[in-house]
């Protein structure tokens, strides 16, 4: 449990406040007898929430006015104290310290709340400590005190499904629906995979509906009849496997012809290069001498100069020809391998039946149309099967949820009825929680929709959860009591005081208006008393015009 909180900025009458000690049961942050505001009651509750892993205090007016600072706090479990420091500027880190405030470990906030969950024995399936306990720390600034929607956060705008899911987990019923949720998710994942496969055309698209499905069956029957007639027209019995082999052999022959054509082209190119390299591209000096004999008036020296220039070019071209020759040889290797491989495959197939090209074309076209339509219908069947699996999984989950939610609903309503009878001395109708489905609930007091009754109902609901689950603590700000009758508040305080194992933190004021027994409860359970100005939590009220730190 939380046993202590301190802060270097806590003040009273100009002096540092002593650490604030907490006990099991009721812990009251008491305001003035006149109900003076802005003295730190709600702020102290936010600091308690901060110790339980909340973040609201780090963004509060107090931090804006005072600047960032440390909050020191201590928890005790099984008689062992655990000391921590959390700084408002870095709320994501919690420092575990020894009793001398020397840091021994830095803990991330998520790991810290997991630690709290384990030590409070709330670490069962589906429970998130902060998301759970925060709902029952109803403090001004946290926006979780909509009296008409008490299960929900964010002023009642959180999804009802999420709020109900948290309740199921808190009652340790999540494992009983987990297997059904996993079955539904598996069915949804299979449908998603099926749709992705269709999107990228890994499988055929399904027909649009049952009529198209039935039309396909009719067309398939007609095509199969055409196929049978075509087989009959052939002079020999037709084996579909042999037709497929013949088609494969034809396809291989076409590929082989293309490969050989390309190979021959490259071999011709290589032959020309070899010819150019062996014989040269330009005339030799011997060629020029013969030319001079035929044409004595030709300028031989000029031709020789030209030939020398050509020789220089020939030297340059020689390197390029060598490179081209090497490239062509490399390109011929895989082509020859391809031809050999295709030749081997064709020899392995060797259809035992010969078919005309006309027959093969007609037969193959019919066969492909039949397979296409059959694939479409098969995809339709697969889609329907997957959808039926999803519906079945969803129905089973809903059925299990009905059972679980009925258990949760009955337990809460029974406790609320008992608490309401105590609070109203058996006179008033209790609030009733109705969980219609996994994503819908109602909360009301029959025949009474008054503001005070609704707030009373929310207080009773919280106490019922505290009494019937592993929830370790709750916090109620003074604003929750504002519309509730004095008589009801006296009974609720008496009920708070009965709690001896868990912790209840409340902000309260105007204790003088209640009966002697209630004043005694307040006195015995007050852990911090606040009032105006120097009696405020931080020793001053920054809302004053003349306020100074």
Image: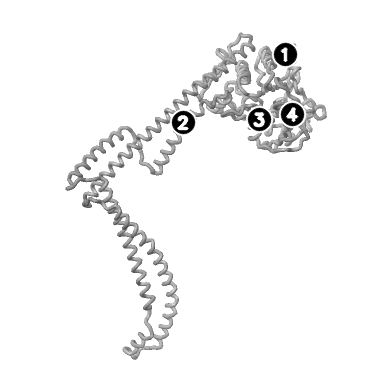
Residue located beneath label 2 in the image: 184
Cβ–Cβ below 8 Å for labels 3 and 4?
Answer: no
Q: Secondary structure at mark 4?
A: strand
- Near mark 1 (Cα within 10 A), the count class, few <14, some 14-19 or many ≥20, is many
Q: CA distance from mark 4 to mark 2?
A: 46 Å
The image's mark for residue 116 is 3
The numbered mark, 3 or 1, whose residue comes first in the sequence reads 3
Q: Secondary structure at mark 1?
A: helix
Q: CA distance from mark 3 to mark 1?
A: 33 Å
The numbered mark, 4 or 2, whose residue comes first in the sequence reads 4
Q: Secondary structure at mark 3?
A: helix
Of labels 4 and 2, the one closer to you: 2
Report x, y in % for residue 325: 40, 70
User: Which residue occupies the foreground of this view, 317 or 96?
Assistant: 96
User: Which residue occupies the foreground of this view, 354 or 326?
Assistant: 354
Left or right of 273, for residue 433? right
Q: Is residue 386 above or below residue 514?
A: below
**Can residue 64 be seen in this snapshot?**
no
- Near mark 2 (Cα within 10 A), the count class, few <14, some 14-19 or many ≥20, is many
Q: Is residue 89 above or below residue 472?
A: below
Residue located beneath label 1 in the image: 518
Report x, y in % for residue 89: 70, 38
- Based on the displayed image, in which of its 4 quarters is residue 523 positioned? top right
The numbered mark, 4 or 1, whose residue comes first in the sequence reads 4
Cβ–Cβ below 8 Å for labels 4 and 1?
Answer: no
**Can residue 462 be seen in this snapshot?**
yes
Cβ–Cβ below 8 Å for labels 3 and 1?
Answer: no
Residue located beneath label 4 in the image: 5
Of labels 3 and 4, the one closer to you: 3
Q: CA distance from mark 3 to mark 4?
A: 16 Å
Cβ–Cβ below 8 Å for labels 4 and 2?
Answer: no
């Amino acid at each position: 449990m939380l046993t202590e909180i301190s802060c270097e900025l806590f003040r009273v009458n100009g002096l540092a406040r002593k650490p604030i000690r907490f006990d099991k049961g009721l812990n009251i942050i008491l305001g003035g007898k006149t109900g003076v505001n802005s003295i730190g009651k709600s702020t102290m509750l936010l600091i308690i929430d901060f110790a339980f892993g909340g973040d609201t205090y780090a963004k509060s007016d107090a931090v804006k006015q005072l600047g960032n600072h440390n909050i020191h706090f201590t928890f005790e479990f099984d008689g062992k104290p655990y000391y921590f420091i959390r700084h408002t500027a870095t709320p994501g880190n919690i420092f575990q310290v020894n009793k001398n405030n020397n840091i021994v470990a830095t803990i991330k906030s998520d790991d810290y709340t997991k630690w709290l969950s384990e030590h409070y024995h709330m670490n069962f399936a589906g429970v998130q400590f902060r998301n759970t306990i925060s709902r029952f720390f109803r403090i001004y600034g946290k926006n979780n005190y909509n009296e008409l929607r008490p299960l929900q956060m964010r002023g009642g705008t959180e999804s009802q499904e999420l709020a109900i899911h948290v309740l199921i987990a808190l009652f340790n019923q999540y494992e009983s629906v987990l297997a059904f949720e996993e079955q539904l998710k598996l069915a949804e994942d299979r449908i998603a995979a099926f749709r992705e496969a269709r999107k990228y055309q890994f499988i055929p698209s399904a027909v649009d509906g049952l009529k198209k499905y039935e039309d396909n069956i009719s067309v398939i029957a007609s095509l199969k009849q055409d196929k049978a007639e075509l087989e009959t027209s052939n002079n020999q019995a037709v084996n579909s496997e042999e037709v497929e082999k013949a088609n494969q052999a034809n396809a291989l022959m076409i590929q082989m012809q293309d490969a050989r054509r390309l190979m021959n082209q490259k071999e011709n190119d290589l032959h020309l290069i070899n010819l150019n390299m062996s014989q040269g591209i330009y005339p030799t000096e011997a060629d020029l001498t013969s030319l001079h004999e035929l044409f004595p008036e030709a300028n031989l020296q000029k031709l020789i100069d030209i030939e020398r220039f050509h020789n220089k070019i020939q030297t340059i071209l020689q390197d390029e020809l060598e490179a081209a020759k090497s490239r062509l040889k490399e390109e011929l290797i895989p082509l020859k391998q391809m031809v050999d491989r295709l030749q081997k495959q064709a020899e392995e197939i060797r259809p035992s039946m010969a078919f005309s090209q006309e027959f093969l074309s007609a037969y193959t076209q019919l066969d492909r149309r039949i397979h296409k339509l059959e694939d479409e219908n098969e995809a339709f069947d697969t889609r329907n099967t997957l959808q039926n699996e999803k519906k079945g999984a969803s129905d089973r989950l809903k059925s299990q949820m009905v059972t679980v939610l009925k258990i949760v609903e009955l337990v809460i309503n029974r406790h609320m009825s008992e608490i309401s009878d105590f609070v109203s001395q058996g006179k008033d109708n209790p609030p009733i929680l109705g969980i219609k489905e996994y994503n819908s609930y109602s909360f009301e007091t029959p025949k009474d929709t008054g503001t005070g009754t609704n707030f009373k109902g929310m207080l009773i609901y919280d106490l019922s959860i505290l009494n019937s689950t592993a929830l370790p603590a709750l916090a109620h700000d003074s604003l929750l009591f504002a519309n509730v009758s004095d008589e009801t508040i006296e009974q609720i305080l008496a009920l708070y005081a009965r709690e001896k194992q868990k912790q209840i933190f409340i902000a309260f004021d105007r204790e003088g208006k209640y009966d002697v027994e209630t004043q005694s409860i307040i006195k015995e359970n007050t852990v911090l008393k606040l009032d105006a100005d120097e009696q405020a939590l931080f020793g001053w009220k920054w809302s004053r015009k003349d306020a100074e730190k």
